[in-house]
Image: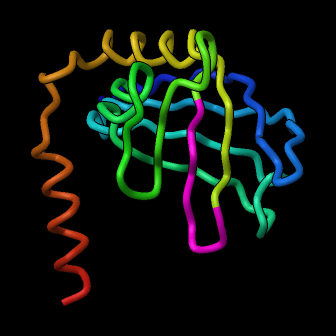
Amino acid sequence: MPITLEQPTGAHLLTPDHEELSVPVTLRYSSADPLAVHFVFPAWISLDGEEVTWTFARALLEEGLDTPAGLGTVHIRPADATHTLVEFRTPEGVAAVVFNSLALERFLFRSYTVTQPGAESVEPALERGLASMLDGV
């Protein structure tokens, strides 16, 4: 049976006019998807009024806490000594969100108690991916 961790945390969305909007974010990790982390944003913050979940590699979060990381839609880097900047990129633009680094580190370390880095089984994810590809055939 999969184990799921959830950690509510606060963050600050940086607006285009350089203001900060407080946003509650739920950090989620599941042993059913051991290579990924999920950042869940409330519906009121999205353009379409729907809850938004960003899913990306747990290794990217780990790397981005110490040094700039990311190539695709998610970029993570230290903002200062106590904060981490996460950029979520879409065709509509970039959402820059600042998190307390200790909250992200605590979440990451909690995920390691469920699945140690390097001990992730990729077989279930591969099977799901193959199944979804074959559904379209």
* Residue located farthest toward the bottom when viewing the structure as drawn: 137
Residue at 89 percent of width and 51 percent of height: 17
The spot of residue 3 in percent (x, y) is: 37, 25
Residue at 39 percent of width and 10 percent of height: 109
Colour basis: rainbow
Residue at 22 percent of width and 59 percent of height: 128
Magenta stretch in the rendered image: 85-93
Tell me the quarter of the image containing the N terminus: top left
Splitting the image into 4 quarters, where does residue 30 fall?
Answer: top left
Queried whether the magenta region covers residue 86, the answer comes back as: yes
The spot of residue 56 in percent (x, y) is: 40, 45
Q: Is residue 64 above or below residue 41?
A: above
Tell me the quarter of the image containing the C terminus: bottom left
Queried whether the magenta region covers residue 11, the answer comes back as: no
Q: How many marks?
A: 0
The residue nearer to you, when weighing 102 against 118, is 102
The spot of residue 19 in percent (x, y) is: 89, 40
The spot of residue 76 in percent (x, y) is: 48, 36
Q: Is residue 10 above or below residue 72?
A: above
Q: Is residue 105 above or below residue 17?
A: above
